[in-house]
Image (spheres, grey):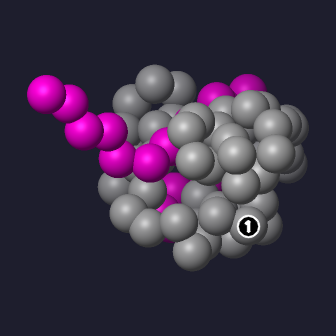
Amino acid sequence: MIKLLFFGALADKVGKQSMQAEAGQRLQDLIVAVGCADMQPLLVAVNQEQVHDLAYIVKDGDEVALMPPFAGG
């Protein structure tokens, strides 16, 4: 199992801040499965490191964070 974390507007869209999912899936497939494929651009981190390759296969125990881009000032 993996842990999915949602931040900002993504948490609002999904209706929760975290959930569990099966390991062995591509990040791209997870994003579609949780209903966030239309939320672009999207920042993705695995185990607190940003990932750009959405073909990455999540492994058992991974923590995946999905978040909208941040703006600061």
What is the secondary structure assignment of the residue under circle 1? loop
Q: Is residue 37 above or below residue 15?
A: below
- Residue 39 in the image: state x and y as whole percent: 53, 66
Position of 36 with respect to 56 (left or right) is: right
Residue at the location (46% across, 25% down)?
Answer: 48
Residue at image coords 32%, 39%: 70
Q: Is residue 22 magenta?
A: no
- Percent x, y of residue 62: 66, 31
Residue 4 sits in quarter: top right
Q: Which of the two residues, 73 or 31, is positioned nearer the viewer here? A: 73
Within-10-Å neighbours for mark 1: few <14, some 14–19, many 20+:
few
Residue 58 appears in the picture as rendered = no
What is the residue that sits farthest to the front in this orientation?
73
Q: State which region is magenta.
A: 54-73
Horizontally, residue 68 falls left or right of residue 5, namely left
Q: Which residue is mark 1?
A: 35
Q: Main secondary structure of the magenta part?
A: loop
Quadrant containing the C terminus in the rendered view: top left
Visible in this render: residue 47? Answer: yes
Rendered view: 22 above or below 1: below
The answer to which of 9 and 46 lies nearer the viewer is: 9
Question: What residue appears at the point 67 percent right and 34 percent down from the top-left corner?
Answer: 5
At a point 59% along the width and 58% down the height, the residue shown is 27
